[in-house]
Amino acid sequence: MLKCFLFIFIISVFVPLVLAMRGMILGPGRWLVLNIIECENPDQYEIMYNINRKKINRTHDCFNMNMELDRVINTTYAIHIDVYQEFDGRFNFYKKITDDCACSFVMTHAGVSAKRALTMANIDPPDCPLQPGPITINNFVMDYRELSRHSVYGTFQADVYLLYNKVRIACTRVIANFEYVDDEADDFDFDDYGDF
Ligand SMILES: *[C@@H]1O[C@H](CO)[C@@H](O)[C@H](O)[C@H]1NC(C)=O
Ligand SMILES: *[C@@H]1O[C@H](CO)[C@@H](O)[C@H](O)[C@H]1NC(C)=O
C-alpha cells in the first residue's frame, strides 16, 4: 500500500517552493502549509497512505513516515501538479506543473531538504534511484522558512500526482497559504497570528 510514499511525501512538503520557482512571484512573505490530506476518492490510486504530520508551531512541522518500498523508484516516474487558487471561498484552477522525471524534479526544487530526508531514512547515497526495502523517517522537522520568500499571495490547493506510464498511481493534496510578512521578520511575534 505504501509503495512510493516517501517520494510523494517529499514532493508534497515542497509544493510551495515549486510554485514559487515556477515564476509565480508577486511579493515577499511566508508560506504556511495548512494541511496535507488525501485526494478525492483515494481508493482509485494504486498507492495509498496516511501522512503523520504534527504541528510544532507556526513555522515548523514534524513528519513521521514508515513504509515498505516494493519497487525501484527511478527516472521513469513522472509528476503532475494541479494548482488551484482560492477565490471567494472556492478553489479555481490556476496552473498545471508537470515534469517527465519526478526524481530530478524533486532534486532540482528541493535538493537540500530532500537529501536531508533521504539521509534520515538511511538511503545512501541520498538520491534516486530508491531501492526497495523498508524506509523509516522519524521526526523530520520542516522549517517552512526554508521555502521561497517571494510568491503570489493567496491560499492554494495543489493535487500532486505521481505517474508511471502515464497512469496516476499516487496522489496527495496540499493546502498552503502565502501571506505578506515583513521581511527580516524571523523574530516577529508569533502571537500576532493567533490560531488557525
Ligand atoms: C518552533 O519550533 C522549532 C523546532 O522545534 C524551534 O526551533 C523554533 O524555535 C520554534 N519557534 C518558536 C517561535 O517557538
Ligand atoms: C525503472 O524501473 C522500471 C520498473 O522497475 C523498469 O522497468 C525500468 O527499466 C527502469 N528504468 C530505468 C531507466 O532504470
Image (cartoon, rainbow, N blue to C red):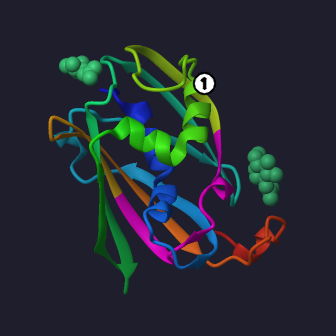
Amino acid type, callout 1: Thr
Q: Is residue 124 above or below residue 10?
A: above
Q: Is residue 117 above or below residue 54?
A: above
Observer able to see residue 196: no
The quadrant where residue 114 appears: top right
Ligand 2: which quarter?
A: top left
Which residue corresponds to the image point at 35% horizontal and 27% vertical from the top-left?
2
Query: Label 1's element?
Result: helix
Q: Quick one: label 1, few (<14), some, or many (20+) residues within 10 Å? A: some
Relative image position of residue 139 (x, y in whole percent):
64, 33
Q: Is mark 1 within 8 Å of ligand 1?
A: no
Which residue corresponds to the image point at 53% horizontal and 22% vertical from the top-left?
136
Which residue corresponds to the image point at 43% horizontal and 23% vertical from the top-left?
67
Observer able to see residue 106: yes
Residue 97 relative to residue 147: left or right: left
From which residue to which does the magenta span run?
Answer: 141-158
Which residue corresponds to the image point at 58% horizontal and 17% vertical from the top-left?
122
Q: Residue furthest top?
A: 133
Residue 6 relative to residue 59: left or right: left
Q: Quadrant of the N terminus?
A: top left
Q: Is residue 182 above or below residue 18?
A: below
**Magenta run includes residue 144:** yes
Residue 184 relative to residue 102: left or right: right
According to the picture, the residue beneath numbered tag 1 turns out to be 119
**Magenta run includes residue 43:** no
Relative image position of residue 126 (x, y in whole percent):
54, 24
Relative image position of residue 39 (x, y in whole percent):
29, 52
